[in-house]
Amino acid sequence: MTLCAWGDGSLAKQSLQRLCAALTLWHGCSLSSEGLNQRFTDRAVAFLREVFFLLLLHQRPLLLSAMETYRTCFTRLRILDSTSFLVPADYGEDYRGSVSSGVKIQFEYDLLSGACLQLCVQSANDSDARFAYHAQHTILPNDLCIRDLGFFSVAALAEIDARGAYYITRLRSDMKVYIKENGQWKEWDWESLGNQLEEGESVEMEHVYIGHERLYVPRLVFRRLTAEEWQKRMAYVRKKEKEKGRRWHAKPSNKRNTTSY
């Protein structure tokens, strides 16, 4: 548990001897390299899984006071996210990454019941949006699906709506938005609106369409980022693009944050 949960994240890169030395330093226990090697078994995986779900259950009482309001509106409050990390090159045939071997874990959790809805291990370069779309059959009426931008897909949002469920998601920066003015639909000018807002100021719009498919979105919140938020966002984007071996150039018109409901 110490090595897997409280280490520095380089467990797979360190030798068994070094890991044994770390355990001796932290806990004063004496363990041989082979003794440690024999502890990485299916039982160890089951143990870590059980600890993980117990932690989730212990967090739920802290949220119960706020949950009662949501229960009156939604069947489930589904939070879907993923995390990815590098693995040794020996795993390259089964788990591929953008640059080297990598693993991605997809996890969906119902905040109202504490149940794990999905837990999937896949290659790091597999698409989040594709995973979300193929998991649509699990969505029930009155579910609320909360996802970040990596899972954005117009087709997935349309399917959620068709199933009588709801969603909260970020909107892709290249997505066109259409609003109705004087009885006619026209494309929304992001940059013009952004220039009218102060840093941190937001505006909410109702009954808009997004994308060439003209997907109906009941509510769209547009917010201009603060200078600090903008710098953090750009640092994150540059880091991600560097990991993929690409160069990225920021545009002033991208200084915005949009969320659709």
Image (cartoon, grey):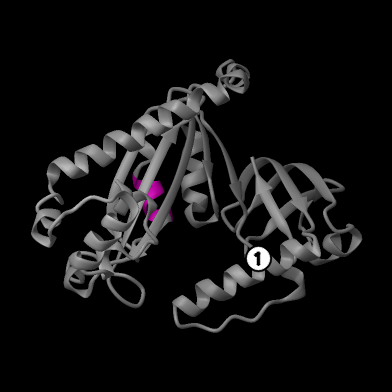
When the figure is inspected, residue 251 is found, relative to residue 198, above or below; the finding is below
- Whether 130 is among the magenta residues is yes
In the image, is 30 to the left or to the right of 184? left
Percent across and percent down for residue 38 are 9, 52
Which three-letter amino acid code belongs to the residue tagged 1?
Arg
The picture quadrant where one finds residue 18 is: bottom left
Q: Of 203 and 184, which appears nearest the observer?
A: 203
Residue lying at 18% horizontally and 43% vertically, measured from the top left: 44
Q: What secondary structure is marked by label 1? A: helix
Count of marks overlaid on the render: 1
Circle 1 sits on which residue?
A: 233
On the question of residue 219 being in view, the answer is yes
Residue at 63 percent of width and 18 percent of height = 69
Q: Nearer the viewer, residue 79 or 58?
A: 58
**Image position, residue 116 (x, y; %):** 36, 33
Q: In this rendering, is residue 131 above or below 173?
A: above
Q: Magenta stretch mostly in which secondary structure?
A: helix
Identity of the residue drawn at 26% across and 69% down: 14
Q: Position of residue 86 (x, y in %)?
A: 33, 68
135 over 198 or under it: above or below = above
Placement of the C terminus among the 4 image quadrants: top right
Which residues lie in the magenta part?
Answer: 129-134
What residue is drawn where x is 51% and y is 43%? 158
Q: Which of these two is toward me, 35 or 67?
A: 35
